Image (spheres, helix red, strand yellow):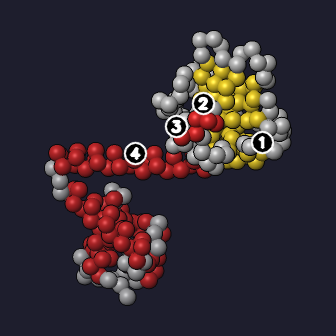
């Protein structure tokens, strides 16, 4: 059933939004300007043919035109009311509304573009190795015992692979089962965390070299200093550095470390 008040307001706002006079709209519909005026004032109701012609002229559904489409109708009413109020504003008010609309339009558009970029961005996959816990086993990058894992933007671009840590020697900074990501091209400095192999056993430790060139791989956990690995520079032990652990610059050598 046609809601007169809604239809009258809708028709008037649609016509004005397209800068049409009552005469020009009547010419499009094949009726007189007086007929259009009577519709807008609620004096007459258009026929079904006239309603269909109005829908075609304004490119909206009949339900939206007469207020029966809950979603479209409500949205259209809001737009029409805003347009009507906007026309009554002074120059200052219109400038303020224009600026708010511009800012909000840009915000929504940026959000939409961000979603599109997120959908289009290819996933990043890195190999993640399980850290061996015993001597004599292969080490990261020397075997195929890894799982390709999708990583997020929080993983630094320099990371080339990940290692799943075993044990608590790097607590409280790196926990048992946590994955750390490694840059194999980085140069390690005293105090950096790295992934090392000593005689085939793999460790995640703090890198420390004393003034005599002796290497100590230090545990961050002050209660597990017995797990430190000391390598005398003249021992002939085989030491291999696989890279620097990224994102753990806050790791500190315990005060209990004698070095």
Contact between marks 4 and 2 (CB within 8 A): the answer is: no
The residue under label 2 is: 218
- Marks 3 and 2, Cα distance to the nearest angstrom? 10 Å
Q: Is mark 4 on a helix, strand or loop?
A: helix
Q: In which quarter of the image is residue 65?
A: bottom left
Q: What element carries label 1?
A: loop
Residue 128 picture location, percent across and down: 72, 43
- Closer to us: 251 or 56: 251
Choose the circle earlier in sequence order: 4 or 3.
Answer: 4
Residue at image position (83%, 34%) is: 142
- Closer to us: 159 or 137: 137
Q: Residues within 10 Å of mark 1 (few under 14, many from 20)?
A: few
The residue under label 4 is: 106
**Residue 122 visible:** no
- Marks 4 and 1, Cα distance to the nearest angstrom? 57 Å
Q: Residue furthest top?
A: 212
Residue 214 picture location, percent across and down: 66, 17
The quarter of the image holding the N terminus is bottom left
Contact between marks 4 and 1 (CB within 8 A): the answer is: no
Tell me if residue 55 comes above or below residue 228 in the rendering.
Answer: below
Tell me if residue 236 comes above or below residue 221 in the rendering.
Answer: above
Choose the circle earlier in sequence order: 4 or 1.
Answer: 4
The image's mark for residue 222 is: 3
The residue under label 1 is: 134
Choose the circle earlier in sequence order: 1 or 3.
Answer: 1
The quarter of the image holding the C terminus is top right
Q: Is residue 162 left or right of residue 93?
A: right
- Closer to us: 82 or 21: 82
- Closer to us: 121 or 25: 121
Q: How crowded is mark 4: few (under 14 residues within 10 Å), some or many (20 or more)?
A: few
Residue at image position (42%, 71%) is: 72
């Amino acid at each position: 059933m046609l809601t007169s008040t809604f239809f009258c307001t809708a028709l008037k706002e649609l016509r004005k939004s397209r800068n049409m006079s009552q005469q020009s709209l009547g010419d499009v519909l094949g009726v007189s300007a007086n007929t259009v005026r009577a519709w807008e004032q609620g004096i007459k109701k258009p026929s079904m043919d006239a309603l269909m012609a109005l829908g075609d002229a304004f490119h909206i559904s009949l339900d939206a035109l007469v207020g029966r489409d809950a979603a479209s109708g409500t949205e259209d009413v809001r737009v029409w009311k805003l347009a009507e109020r906007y026309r009554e504003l002074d120059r200052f008010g219109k400038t303020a509304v224009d600026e708010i609309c511009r800012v909000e339009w840009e915000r929504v558009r940026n959000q939409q573009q961000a979603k599109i970029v997120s959908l289009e961005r290819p996933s990043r996959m890195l190999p993640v190795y399980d850290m061996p816990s015993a001597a004599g086993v292969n080490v990261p990058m020397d075997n195929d015992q890894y799982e390709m894992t999708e990583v997020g933007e929080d993983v630094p671009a320099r990371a080339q692979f990940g290692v799943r840590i075993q044990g608590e020697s790097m607590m409280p900074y790196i926990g048992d089962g946590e994955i750390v990501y490694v840059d194999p091209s980085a140069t390690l400095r005293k105090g950096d965390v790295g992934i090392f192999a000593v005689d085939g056993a793999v460790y995640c430790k703090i890198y420390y070299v004393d003034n005599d060139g002796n290497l100590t791989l230090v545990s961050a956990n002050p209660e597990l200093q017995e797990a430190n690995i000391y390598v005398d520079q003249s021992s002939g032990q085989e030491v291999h550095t696989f890279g620097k652990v990224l994102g753990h610059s806050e790791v500190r050598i315990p005060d209990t470390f004698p070095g």
